[in-house]
Image (spheres, rainbow, N blue to C red):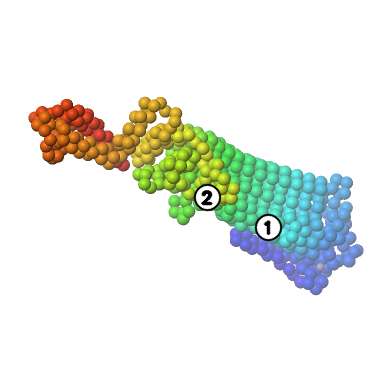
């Protein structure tokens, strides 16, 4: 009987064929000059075959049911394994076999390739301190019960795990070294590399993997994750030289915390959480992020870094933290920064925040302006009069006793001084002004002045001026407020003049009002004699009227410029 084993999925396929054993139901490959597979051959035939193997021959176990007894017999044969040096000198093919034996190798050297392609494995395979001079293949292998695990192994040739699948188990490498590429395209298992060194590429394309963990690994060439879906992704302290990461998708959280990239990186990722805290980008790069809540705390970048959300995304990516990050080299676009704490970010005066970035807005009944989470942090920790209505969804107070059972992604608002928030607003305003973003600059100027007004650190004289400036014209930004004061001044002046202002005695309000309106105008002759009170009122109107008018004009100009 002739047996062909074919595997195909997505982009990969392959096949091999052999003559099957004549035992009913056995698909094992027959050994040369026999009609039975190694498992079913009689003892003489089996020994004849095993002892006659030369290093160029492949040990044929394709399609064979391999149990512990058969495996032990094979591996103890001196033609296959040199027991003194623990060296396996023949290639082994276990393609499409079903292996119920537990494989544990300690200190072995595999001089030739070893092939598990399409095999079904029912128990653990563990290699400790082994050396693989030629390839290790497990394409389309299925780990039904046990895990595939390597500790302190070195691989001098290709390692091919593509389309390997595992049910509730994983493929793990601990302190291993790969000289040639490690290929895990299409893998359907959790792949865990811990303190491993890849001198070449690691490719995991088009996979649907439970998870990828790359703890403290180094990858000297590309890390190719194109089109891969992960349940979770974690690469803390990864060192990589990759240029392009993704596009890839993570169902849960994706972490590159404290990772280092030596080349300019182009990352495209969709995830729930994206943790880039402590990430070091030597050459900067471009991060296109979808959906995720992004933490950038203590991220350092040698050159410019763009953080951009996908513009058409149903859920906008949100930046949650920038403390200690090199914000001056960063550009943000199409992201939600309403919950982002800016205080403590470096070089905020040089950050580029494009108009597509969303900020929080002041609560009603305050006049609407963009404001930052830092202001909410100050207000929430200030007295209740200043914090009422200032609620920012998705955040909580640092000292909130209810904070024990809140979702982990709510941002903690630390205690800040008003002057600290003012300096953040000041820096952001400067960056908006350099980019000629007048509305942004105006909103943040208002915020800066608000924080100065509430600051306990400013001198009394300055405090009085800031208060007056706010009260009279909303820091030169609220035209209506200045106009209201102007109207009030003229009306009160008119009433005052009509009652007590004229030497001729009280007159009607219209006359008083007309006099009051004309008072600030230059070149208007005084044709009515005023009392001492009248002189006072007129001087006040004459002095304050033009100031209020100028403030109102200033505010109008500011609005028109938008
Ligand atoms: Zn057989």
Q: Residue at x 22, y 33 (%)?
A: 545
> What residue is shown with label 2?
292
In screen coordinates, is 560 left or right of 400?
left
Estimate the x, y position of residue 357 in percent, counting from the top left. 43, 45
**In this view of the protein, can residue 544 be seen by the observer?**
yes
Estimate the x, y position of residue 435 in percent, counting from the top left. 38, 37
Q: Residue at x 42, y 28 (%)?
A: 458
Mark 1 vs mark 2, CA separation in Å: 29 Å
Estimate the x, y position of residue 426 in percent, counting from the top left. 41, 33
Above or below: residue 504 compared with residue 371: above
Q: Which of the labelled discs sits on residue 319, or is there none?
A: none
Q: Are marks 1 and 2 in contact (CB under 8 Å)?
A: no
Q: Residue at x 43, y 32 (%)?
A: 455
Viewer-side residue, 201 vs 415: 415
First in residue order: circle 1 vs circle 2: 1
Q: Residues within 10 Å of mark 2 (few under 14, many from 20)?
A: many
Q: Residues within 10 Å of mark 1 (few under 14, many from 20)?
A: many
> What residue is shown with label 1?
164
Residue at the bottom extreme of this rendering: 24
């Amino acid at each position: 009987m002739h047996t062909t084993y074919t595997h195909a999925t997505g982009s990969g396929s392959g096949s091999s064929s052999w003559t099957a054993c004549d035992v009913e139901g056995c698909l094992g490959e027959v050994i040369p000059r026999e009609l039975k597979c190694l498992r079913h051959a009689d003892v003489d035939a089996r020994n004849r075959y095993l002892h006659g193997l030369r290093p160029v021959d492949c040990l044929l176990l394709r399609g064979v049911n391999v149990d512990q007894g058969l495996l032990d017999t094979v591996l103890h044969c001196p033609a296959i394994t040199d027991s003194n040096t623990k060296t396996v000198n023949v290639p082994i093919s276990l393609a499409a076999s079903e292996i119920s034996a537990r494989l544990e190798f300690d200190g072995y050297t595999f001089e030739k390739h070893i092939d598990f392609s399409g095999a079904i494995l029912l128990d653990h395979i563990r290699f400790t301190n082994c050396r693989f001079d030629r390839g290790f293949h497990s394409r389309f292998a299925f780990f039904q019960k046990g895990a595939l695990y390597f500790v302190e192994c070195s691989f001098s040739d290709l390692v091919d795990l593509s389309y390997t699948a595992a049910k509730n188990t994983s493929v793990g490498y601990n302190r291993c070294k790969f000289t040639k590429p490690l290929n895990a395209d299409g893998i359907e298992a959790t792949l865990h590399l811990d303190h491993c060194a890849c001198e070449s590429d690691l490719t995991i394309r088009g996979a649907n993997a439970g998870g990828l963990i790359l703890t403290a690994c180094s990858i000297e060439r590309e890390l190719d994750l194109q089109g891969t879906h992960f349940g979770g992704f974690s690469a803390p302290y990864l060192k990589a030289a990759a240029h392009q990461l993704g596009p890839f998708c993570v169902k849960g959280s994706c972490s590159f915390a404290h990772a280092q990239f030596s080349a300019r990186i182009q990352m495209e990722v969709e995830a729930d959480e994206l943790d880039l805290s402590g990430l070091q980008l030597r050459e900067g790069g471009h991060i296109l992020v979808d959906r995720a809540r992004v933490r950038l705390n203590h991220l350092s970048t040698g050159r410019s870094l763009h953080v951009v959300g996908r513009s058409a995304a149903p859920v906008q990516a949100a930046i949650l933290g920038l403390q200690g990050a090199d914000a001056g080299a960063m550009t943000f676009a199409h992201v939600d920064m309403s919950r982002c704490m800016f205080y403590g970010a470096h070089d905020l005066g040089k950050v580029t925040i494009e108009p597509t970035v969303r900020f929080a807005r002041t609560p009603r009944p305050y006049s609407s302006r963009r404001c930052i989470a830092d202001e909410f942090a100050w207000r929430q920790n200030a007295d209740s009069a200043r914090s009422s209505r200032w609620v920012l969804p998705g955040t909580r107070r640092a000292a909130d006793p209810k904070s024990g059972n809140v979702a982990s992604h709510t941002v903690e608002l630390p205690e800040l001084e008003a002057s600290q928030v003012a300096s953040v607003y000041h820096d952001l305003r400067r960056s908006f002004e350099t980019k000629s973003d007048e509305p942004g600059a105006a909103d943040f100027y208002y915020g800066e002045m608000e924080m100065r007004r509430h600051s306990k650190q400013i001198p009394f004289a300055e405090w009085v001026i800031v208060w007056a400036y706010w009260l009279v014209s909303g820091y030169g930004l609220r035209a209506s407020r200045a106009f209201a004061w102007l109207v009030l001044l003229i009306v009160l002046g008119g009433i005052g003049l009509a009652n007590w202002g004229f030497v001729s005695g009280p007159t009607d309000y219209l006359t008083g009002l007309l006099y009051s309106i004309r008072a600030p105008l230059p070149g208007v002759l005084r044709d009515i004699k005023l009392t001492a009170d009248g002189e006072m009122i007129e001087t006040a109107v004459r002095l304050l009227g033009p100031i209020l008018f100028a403030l109102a004009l200033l505010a109008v100009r500011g609005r028109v410029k938008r």
